[in-house]
Image (cartoon, rainbow, N blue to C red):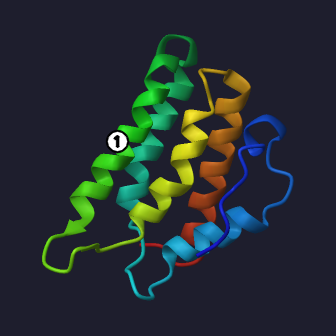
Amino acid sequence: MPKNISISVLTDGIKDLTLVKEWGTYLATNDIKNQVSTSQIRKIFGSIKQIQAGFEKSKGEIILLEPKLAYAVGRDYDKKSNTNKTKIKEFYELLSPLIREINEDKTRFQNFVNVLESIVAYHKAAGGQ
């Protein structure tokens, strides 16, 4: 699993694409757990784009992104094996600290969007389904 992306990316922007590329590739690669599906990512990405489209009116919804991801983790959980079927939990653990640090700040939010868009692009480039 790649290293976590530093919270400084929210204030400084993406300075190096290495980690976001590693995360996109990791989430798209089958190994012990199956890859995160495009539809799993699209659900959170869609919410983010809606907030972005009407930021001033919707910025209060940023805090709700974390529970939406937690819900995706819960839906992915397999009771028989006591594990998640995909890497969505790792995706949640990557994004949650970043979401908590946005604090309804437009620049931080835009930097978060850039990180997520980059991960989605590399996920698709690595064959994410």
x, y (%) of residue 90? Answer: 47, 64
Q: Relative to 39, is 52 above or below?
A: above
Count of marks overlaid on the render:
1
The residue shown at (22%, 57%) is 75
x, y (%) of residue 112? Answer: 65, 40
The residue shown at (50%, 82%) is 29
Q: Which quadrant of the figure has residue 65?
A: top left
In this picture, residue 109 sits left or right of residue 66: right
Residue located farthest toward the bottom when viewing the structure as drawn: 31
Residue type, label 1: Lys
x, y (%) of residue 50? Answer: 46, 29
Q: In which quarter of the image is the N terminus?
A: bottom right
Q: Which quadrant of the figure has residue 64?
A: top left
Residue annotated with mark 1: 68
- Asked which secondary structure carries label 1, the reply is helix
x, y (%) of residue 12? Answer: 84, 39
Q: Relative to 109, is 96 above or below?
A: below
Q: Relative to 74, is 63 above or below?
A: above
Q: Residues within 10 Å of mark 1 (few under 14, many from 20)?
A: some
The residue shown at (23%, 66%) is 77
Q: Which quadrant of the figure has residue 18?
A: bottom right
Residue located farthest toward the left when viewing the structure as drawn: 80
